[in-house]
Amino acid sequence: TIQERLEHYVSVKDFGAKGDNVTDDTAAIQAAVNAVEARGTLFANKSGVGGTVFFPSGTYQISDEIRVEGHGVVIEGEGPAATCIRLMNETKNGFLFAGPDPFNTGNSDPIGARPLGQGIRNLRMILEGANHTDARSNTMIRVRRSLFHADNVDLQGYNQGIVLEGVAEGTKISNMQM
């Protein structure tokens, strides 16, 4: 139903993000991510199904890393030409996708339980004032222990656009420009 769909879809603006290229939207964006993560056990064969954190058209400034730690969470904009996330602190990373270990579903889960994974799509990410002297700094997207999907993402200004660490089979990255 439409109501069920809305329960798994939140806008960052509902949590106070402005997207005006002036306001620091970090806390509002993290609150939206946390709300989606809090919706239950996020495995494909259980009741919780994660959800989408939606960024309407605009430029959202962040000053610190946004942590996405629950399975089934997708970050989505209206497209790279319409939705931009601008990291204003060159010493920070943009997004950390760090789900529970996709290779170990735990003893209480039925055999064959599979995490839904995490994802990001349809937006542009920019780092302002990048310091390109340290090859380890300025990572826009860092993925740890996750089944991860990325599509239609434009990354600008980073030493490392995306770093994958211990990702699960089935991870897919398509239409990404760096």
Image (cartoon, helix red, strand yellow):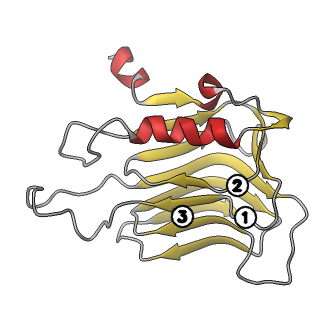
- Residue at which label 1 appears: 92
Residue 27, how many percent across, how many down? 65, 40
Element type where label 3 sits in the image: strand
Task: Name the amino acid, label 2.
Answer: Asp
In three-dimensional space, the C-alpha distance between marks 2 and 3, rounded to whole angstroms, equals: 24 Å
Task: Name the amino acid, label 3.
Answer: Ile
Q: CB atoms at circles 2 and 1 under 8 Å apart?
A: yes
The quarter in which the N terminus is drawn is top left
User: Which residue is drawn at the image coordinates 40% and 60% (left, top)?
Assistant: 99
Residue 148, how many percent across, how many down? 45, 61
Q: Earlier in the sequence, mark 2 or mark 1?
A: 2
- Residue at which label 2 appears: 64
Q: In this view, does 139 lie to the left or right of 73?
A: right
Residue 147, image quadrant: bottom left
Q: Please rate how many residues cluster around mark 1, counting C-alpha atoms within 10 Å: few if below 14, some from 14 to 19, many from 20.
A: some
Residue 108, image quadrant: bottom left
Q: Which of marks 2 and 3 is in front?
A: 2
45 or 138: nearer the eye?
A: 138
Element type where label 2 sits in the image: loop
Q: In this view, does 129 lie to the left or right of 62?
A: right
- Residue at which label 3 appears: 173
In three-dimensional space, the C-alpha distance between marks 2 and 1, rounded to whole angstroms, equals: 6 Å
